[in-house]
Each structure stands twice: as C-alpha cells, then as structure tokens.
Amino acid sequence: MNKIKNSSMFLLWAGAAISIAEIYTGGIIAPLGLAKGLAAILLGHLIGTLLLAFGGYVSFAGKKNAMEKVRDSFGSGGVKLVAALNVLQLLGWSAVMIIQAGRALNGLVPMFQGFGLAIVGVIVFFWFFFFNNFSKRINDISVLLLILLCGVLFMNFSGAAPVLPKDSISFVLALEISISMPISWLPLIGDYAKDGESSRGVFLGSFFGYFLASSFMYILGLLIMLYTGMDVIEFLSGNSFKVAGILVILLSTVTTTFLDVYSAVVSSKQIFPVKNENMMVLVYTVIATAVAYVFPIEGYQSFLLLIGSVFIPVYTVVFTGCLMGESEEPSSFNVVGIALAACGTLLYNYLSANGIGMPTIIVLAAVSSTYMIIKKISVFGGVANEQ
C-alpha cells in the first residue's frame, strides 16, 4: 500500500467512524438524557480515541503493522493467539455492519427484500479492490459526501423536546460503549498508520478524524432516539430524504467494512501464509456475509464490550512495553504479557458485569503497573544473578 497523505489519514478514520453501527450505538445511550448522554459520548470518545491514535503512532514509529507490533510484545507464538482473536472480531464486526446496512436497504428499497445483505457484501469487496489497487481518492470523496449527507439528516428532526426512552442505562455503561468503539479499531489502525506521511499527521489525523466523526454519529443516534423514539433504521426508512438515507447506508458501510476485512487478511498473515490478498479478501467477505445471516444482532452491545475486554489489556501490554523501551521480540511466548492480558480480560468483564468503577481505566492502570513491576523485578533479578 502506498503512502497515505495526512488529509487522507483524517478522511480514512472519519470514514471508518461514519456508520450505521455508530448511530445505532448512540441511540442506546438515549435513556441518560441529552446532557448526560453528551457527556458520556464525548468523554468516552476522548479516552478511546487517544488510545487509538497512540496505537497508530506506535506502528508508524516502528514501521510495522498492528499485529507485527503485537508480535514484538507477545512473541511469535503469542501473536498467533491475538491475531486469531482479531480475525474473529473483525469478521464479527463486518457481519454486524452488513446486517445493519442490509436490513436498512431491505426496508428502504422493497425490491431488495431478502437480498440486502448479499448486495452489501458484494459492494464491500469491490470497494476494497478499487481502494487497494487503484485510488484512495474515491474514498476521500465518499467520506466528504457522507459528512454532507449526515448533516442533512442531522437537521431533519421534528419535536419540541426530548422524550426519554423507557429503557435504562448507567452512565458508566454508556461511557464504556463510547470507549469500546474506537478501541475496536486498535488491532488494525497500525495496518494503515505505518504508511502515513508523518508521526504528527498519523496521530492528529487519526485522532481528530475518528473523534469528530464518531462523536457526531453517536450524537446523531442519541438525538434520533430522543426526538423520534426510533432507531436509525426506522428513522431512515420513514425519512423524507430516502435517497440520502440509501447513500448514507451504502457509503458508510463500505468505507468502514472494507477496513475490517482487509485487516483480517493482514492479521491472518501471522497465522498462515497469504499468497493472494484479493482472493483472501473475497473469502473473508463471503464468510462475513454468511455470518451476517445468523449473527445474533440483539447481542450487539455485549459483542462491543467483549471486544474492549480483550483488546484493552492486550494493547496495554503493547503500549507499556513500548514506553519502557522494550526492543527485543520474545522468542515465542511472552508468558507475563499473555497472563496479564488474560487477567485483564477477566477483570474487565467482572467489573463491567457488576457495574463497578470504570473498567477501561482500572484495567489500564492494573495491567500496566503490574507489567512494569514484574519486568523491573526480572531485570534487577537478572543483574543480581550475573553479579
């Protein structure tokens, strides 16, 4: 892949953030009300996107993709486990995107009834093929069009005052699902960041591109639910701007999902040889589309939190190792790193299930501090033994 300009880096991650899934997730936060909902969205995105942008910076600095940086911390054996988990979450995430876009397409265009998912899958593959082999400008133009279309939707509300949905959600849970969305991109941002123009451009471009667009999507979903009582698909189906709705669905899905599918291919290279990327993208697109027909979309919120529970502790180990200046790749397995990542996942799920504190912050602090202490002790112990 050729160098990605700073402006294209911004638009790449803005495009990744503009999706039906993000609007839908913003609607989940609506029971908090407007003020608390906005606070949870903005604070959660600030935390999550800072981690995301740092992940991009780390890959750019080392000129390595996401899983190659994981290999530096977890070893040649440990990275296979992380890469396999990443492929699974990326295919699952692709399926979620295809489901939401396909259902919306079925609702907006009756003649597509029953074929929406397959149509979206085909478009995703050809979008990747064009982006990877010909030009990134089409993606830039599409993202700018998406921003304009979403602005049109943003202004298309009726109702004098917000009405709180009957469902309930805690502020901490709303905060976590705001953090988890940018975190879900951590295992793949390095696949693109390594090809950036500059470290400053990579960090700022990915941060502002994702933070601004994703926050906007969440807020759009929040307002749709508060002012209409509908989820995003119902809103688009009954909206007077149906053409805009169709374009938003298709463009937002392909500018997001092709990133997931391509990075699933990149991660697969840590597990088995990949001789033909285009063929592998086709295979994974078919698999994601097939999974979309059976994926339990009702468990979408739990799926999002599960991604955070796995990759927050994994990347805490990666980031901590980088900050400590670790440069040598473990021979096969970084037992300490793998054990701490596993413990961090269990801790995150326990805290989340019981509504205790802020799971992301607690896991970050616990895993990072423990990793540093163990590594310092092992270094000192090694020096003492040599003496």
Image (cartoon, rainbow, N blue to C red):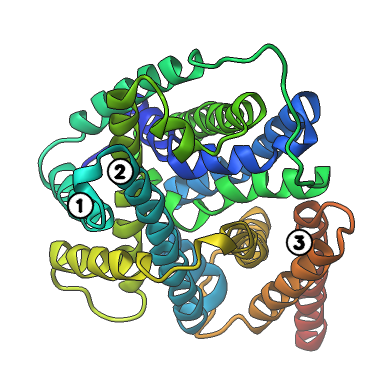
Labels 3, 1: front one: 1
> Residue drawn 14% across and 49% down?
126
Task: Tell me, yes or no, if residue 305 can be seen here.
Answer: yes
Q: Position of residue 176 (x, y in %)?
A: 72, 49
Q: Which residue is mark 1?
A: 119
> Residue drawn 33% across and 72% down?
268
> Residue drawn 25% across and 33% down?
139
> Residue drawn 38% across and 58% down?
94
Q: Which residue is mark 2?
A: 105
Q: CA distance from mark 3 to mark 1?
A: 44 Å
Q: Earlier in the sequence, mark 2 or mark 3?
A: 2
Q: Is residue 111 above or below residue 346?
A: above
- The residue under label 3 is which amino acid type? Ser
Q: CA distance from mark 2 to mark 1?
A: 9 Å
SS at circle 2: helix
Q: Position of residue 231 (x, y in %)?
A: 54, 39
Viewer-proximal residue, 284 or 231?
A: 231
- The residue under label 1 is which amino acid type? Ile
SS at circle 1: helix
Does the CB distance between marks 2 and 1 fall below 8 Å?
yes
Viewer-proximal residue, 211 or 240?
A: 240
Q: CA distance from mark 2 to mark 3?
A: 44 Å
